[in-house]
Image (spheres, rainbow, N blue to C red):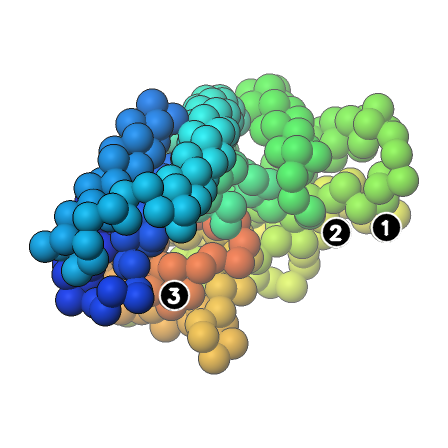
């Protein structure tokens, strides 16, 4: 883009000598200021405008180049061309100044969004109590770089506790809801001994927050989420599912969803049902991986409208460690969607370390 004005002038200079006298191609130089405004600032646009007017005069008064006699320099048609070039140059200068201001504003917005994302969705530690973790976040809105998907992993005295969720809706309300959920989870994960109590406490916080926000969308501010717990004293993962896609267990020769059909309603809708949260416990082996993800992955479509085939893809990549697994998933999602994601995407991969598993019996499901 920065060299486009020079290319534009070069084309005009090449066309001018070969065109008939009745076709004054130099009049096309009136547009060089607008071309310059797309890639340069107002000072450069002003300089280019002056140079364009001078070049138009040179072409009008040079018989060898324009094919016309000397004296056309001040012909009324050429004078009108000089005036038009000057007026377009003034408008292009204003346009360039406006573009610069907008670019600076957009850069500030992106900077704030990046800071907000680091605070809201800070990268998880790569190792927690021996577990290997990696995270992935992709926003469908490239300018925003932040959305309503969320994840977190914290070490506690009850084991490593993980949450992944998807806030209904978009925009600032979704970001605010995600921040409220993560804040409640980070606090309650250290205090509640039972996973259902942790989910219940987070939902209570979400309900309170929704009431404080008020408005007509109170019943729509819900979050699908999965809470998982991997204790240090037992080879097991406990899962509480609140209307979210189930975690996937990746094991040598096996890839399956951890789903026993006992999902609870999404957070902030549980009060409508009043049922307690269920805990499902699944045994783990050394080398196993868990993939927790949001539905933006499985709902990614290709050009023909076909959904992304997550489980078949994971069977190909079962041997990959968490970082390489998520990198491959990232690349494949962009390839499948043609680089056009329709929804935010979050994923969290957790690998059980290779070695002797804990010898204690699995803790009973609460």
* 120 to 298, vertically: above or below: above
Seen in the image, is 292 located left or right of residue 259?
left
Say few, some or many: other residues with alpha carbon within 10 Å of mark 2 (under 14 / 14 to 19 / 20 or more).
many
Q: Quadrant of the N terminus?
A: top left
User: SS for tag 2?
Assistant: loop
Q: Residue 153: x percent and y percent? A: 46, 32
User: SS for tag 3?
Assistant: loop
The CA span between labels 3 and 1 is 41 Å
The residue furthest left is: 64
Instruction: Out of 76 and 251, give the one closest to the viewer.
Output: 76
Q: Which of the two labelled residues, at mark 3 and mark 1, occupies the earlier sequence position?
A: 1
Q: Which residue position is annotated with label 1?
A: 273
Q: Which mark is residue 338?
A: 3
Residue at 80% of width from left, 46% of height from top?
220
Residue at 81% of width from left, 31% of height from top?
210
Residue 64 visible: yes
The CA span between labels 2 and 1 is 8 Å
The CA span between labels 2 and 3 is 33 Å
Q: Quadrant of the C terminus?
A: top right
Q: Which residue position is annotated with label 2?
A: 265
Instruction: Out of 340 and 208, give the one closest to the viewer.
Output: 340
Residue 243, located in which quarter of the rendered image? bottom right
Say few, some or many: other residues with alpha carbon within 10 Å of mark 3 (under 14 / 14 to 19 / 20 or more).
few
Residue 216, located in which quarter of the rendered image? top right
Instruction: Out of 182 and 264, give the one closest to the viewer.
Output: 182
């Amino acid at each position: 883009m920065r060299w486009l004005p020079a290319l534009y002038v070069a084309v005009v200079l090449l066309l001018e000598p070969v065109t008939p006298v009745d076709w004054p191609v130099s009049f096309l130089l009136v547009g060089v200021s607008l071309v310059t405004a797309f890639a340069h600032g107002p000072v450069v646009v002003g300089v280019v405008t002056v140079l364009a007017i001078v070049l138009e005069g040179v072409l009008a008064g040079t018989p060898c180049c324009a094919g016309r006699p000397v004296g056309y320099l001040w012909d009324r048609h050429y004078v009108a061309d000089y005036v038009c070039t000057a007026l377009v140059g003034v408008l292009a200068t204003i346009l360039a100044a406006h573009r610069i201001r907008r670019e600076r504003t957009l850069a500030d917005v992106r900077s704030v969004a990046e800071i907000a994302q680091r605070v809201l969705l800070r990268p998880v530690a790569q190792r927690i109590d021996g577990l290997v973790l990696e995270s992935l976040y992709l926003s469908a809105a490239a300018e925003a770089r932040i959305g309503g998907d969320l994840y977190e992993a914290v070490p506690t005295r009850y084991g490593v506790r993980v949450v992944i969720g998807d806030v209904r809706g978009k925009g600032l309300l979704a970001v605010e809801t995600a921040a409220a959920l993560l804040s409640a989870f980070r606090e309650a994960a250290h205090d509640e001994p039972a996973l259902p109590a942790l989910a219940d406490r987070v939902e209570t916080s979400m309900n309170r927050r929704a009431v404080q926000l008020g408005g007509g969308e109170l019943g729509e501010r819900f979050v699908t989420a999965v809470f998982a717990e991997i204790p240090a004293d037992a080879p097991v993962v406990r899962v509480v599912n609140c209307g979210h896609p189930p975690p996937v267990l990746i094991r040598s020769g096996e890839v399956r969803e951890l789903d026993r059909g006992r999902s609870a309603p999404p957070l902030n809708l549980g009060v409508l049902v009043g049922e307690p949260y269920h805990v499902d416990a699944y045994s783990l082996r050394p080398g196993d991986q868990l993939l927790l993800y949001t539905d933006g992955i499985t709902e990614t479509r290709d050009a023909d409208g076909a959904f992304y085939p997550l489980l078949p893809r994971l069977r190909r990549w079962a041997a990959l460690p968490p970082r390489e697994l998520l990198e491959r998933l990232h690349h494949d999602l962009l390839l499948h969607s043609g680089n056009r994601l329709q929804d935010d995407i979050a994923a969290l991969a957790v690998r059980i370390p290779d070695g002797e598993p804990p010898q204690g019996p699995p803790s009973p499901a609460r």
